[in-house]
Image: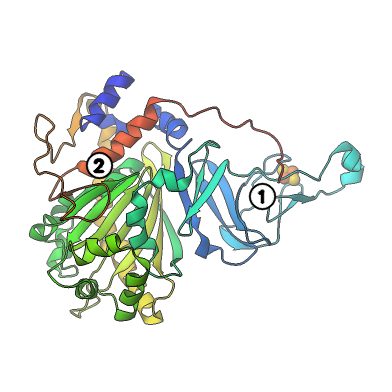
Amino acid sequence: TDQSSLLEDVRRGMIPAHIYNDEEVFRLESERVFGRAWVFVGHESEIPQPGDYVVRRVQEDSFIVSRGEDHRIRALFNMCLHRGMQVCRAEMGNASHFRCPYHGWSYRNDGRLVGLPFHKEAYGGEAGFRRKSQTLLPAPALDTYNGLIFISMDPDAPPLREYLGDFAFYLDYYTKQSPSGIELRGPQRWRIKANWKIGAENFAGDMYHTPQTHTSVVEIGLFREPKAEKRKDGCTYWAGNGGGTTYKLPPGTLEERLRYVGYPDEMIERMTRVWTQEQLDVVGRDGFMVSAASVFPNMSFVHNWPRVEDSDDVLPFISIRTWQPVGPDETEVLSWFAVDAEAPEEFKALSYKAYLMCFGSTGMFEQDDVENWVSLTNTAGGSMARRLLLNSRMGLLEDDATVVPPLPSEQFSGPGEAYVGYGEYNQRHLLRRWADHMERPPGTAEQIRVGGDG
Ligand code: FES
Ligand code: FE
């Protein structure tokens, strides 16, 4: 397919079906999307102490995300400077040093090479090989927001805050409910035979699938919201580099609405202290509560409030996940439970339970969703899919005018553009970002070199 006409179709909301399972598209994504975008790899609360580390990947590249004795967070390319063995083979832990299993070179947790067996005999000591100044290769760029750690393969990536843009406004609902921010548990990790873009699109804006795909969850009364008539009252918003869906809450004050979602009063009190007036107004004045969301390219959020067991009470939970591409038809999902660090212990325990029930690897929503995505991916790999343009134009009329006007600021206090009701606004936004990336190669990559300046 001609690449520029493909991107033109995508921008109109007509999606060439094969982009969900195609070797060539995937190869280009590796270079142009994941070779440049900010990718979420973990949260500071996962590595609170000096020496704590987690190992995370961006596509094929493995990184040790560690906290040094100086408390600084680094992402070190997990490949030995000698012959390229993986220096760290554990998923997480605490270590002052990493010793390569192959020939035993050892590195401090800030990346510096400190141990080299038979340095003198084999290399003639410092005269033959200068051990000092050698370090594991750092990720080209690393930045954080509310404790969320992102890395980019592009040394010239814009600052993370700039990349997120106005989505940061919405990010706070999920990651800053008190001055202490969130703590993460997990991640659970599993693989699905589906293309990575499908999940990101679904979480960004697909309110339309809930009444159909998740019927059984509604029927058993687990979840009081996703009845069709409720979902259409919510709005989808897009701001900066991300967007998501909301539910419309019943009339009430800010406190009443946050209680309706299941937050205890002491948490509500902290939220009113850390959120800006505009952030509070989206909930208290406008009556919208954020639900699922995605940040381009592959990070998503969930905020839901299912019933807990047989009681009438609901309990909110927050989850963060990444759709880590493995191949055109395979994705590794990393899914974390997130909770306000200052929340009462009992709330944390119940909220975790609510998360596992809905969106853990065996969660009920998870099972329903993935069945669709695997099937879609499979069919997208065939020859007929190359002739099909999928319709992702919901919310647009034939002349590209929107079915409903965007919400005016009197009805929606958040930044960006918001629309009430069903529409594929956000899926199109996400794929337009994708098209923008696919159009041009990233800037000159940093020279690959052995060792760095520390
Ligand atoms: Fe690591 Fe040789 S490959 S010490
Ligand atoms: Fe779903």
Q: Say what amino acid the circle numbered 2 marks.
A: Gln
Position in image of residue 307 (x %, y %):
22, 73
Residue drawn at (40%, 32%) of the image: 26
Residue drawn at (14%, 59%) of the image: 215
- State whether residue 40 appears in this view: yes
Q: Nearer the viewer, residue 66 or 197?
A: 66
Q: Nearer the viewer, residue 379 or 87?
A: 87
Q: Earlier in the sequence, mark 1 or mark 2?
A: 1
Q: Residue 87: which numbered mark, if any?
A: 1
Position in image of residue 78 (x %, y %):
62, 47
Q: Please tell me how crowded label 1 is: few (under 14), some (14-19), or many (20+) other residues with Cα within 10 Å.
A: many
Q: Nearer the viewer, residue 16 or 431?
A: 431
Q: Residue 296: which numbered mark, if any?
A: none
The extreme top residue here reads 2
- Residue located beneath label 2 in the image: 427
SS for callout 2: helix
- Quarter of the image holding residue 310? bottom left
- Quarter of the image holding residue 315? bottom left
Position in image of residue 188 (x %, y %):
43, 60
Name the image quarter holding the N terminus.
Answer: top left
- Quarter of the image holding residue 173? bottom left
Query: In the figure, 273 relative to 189: above or below?
Result: below
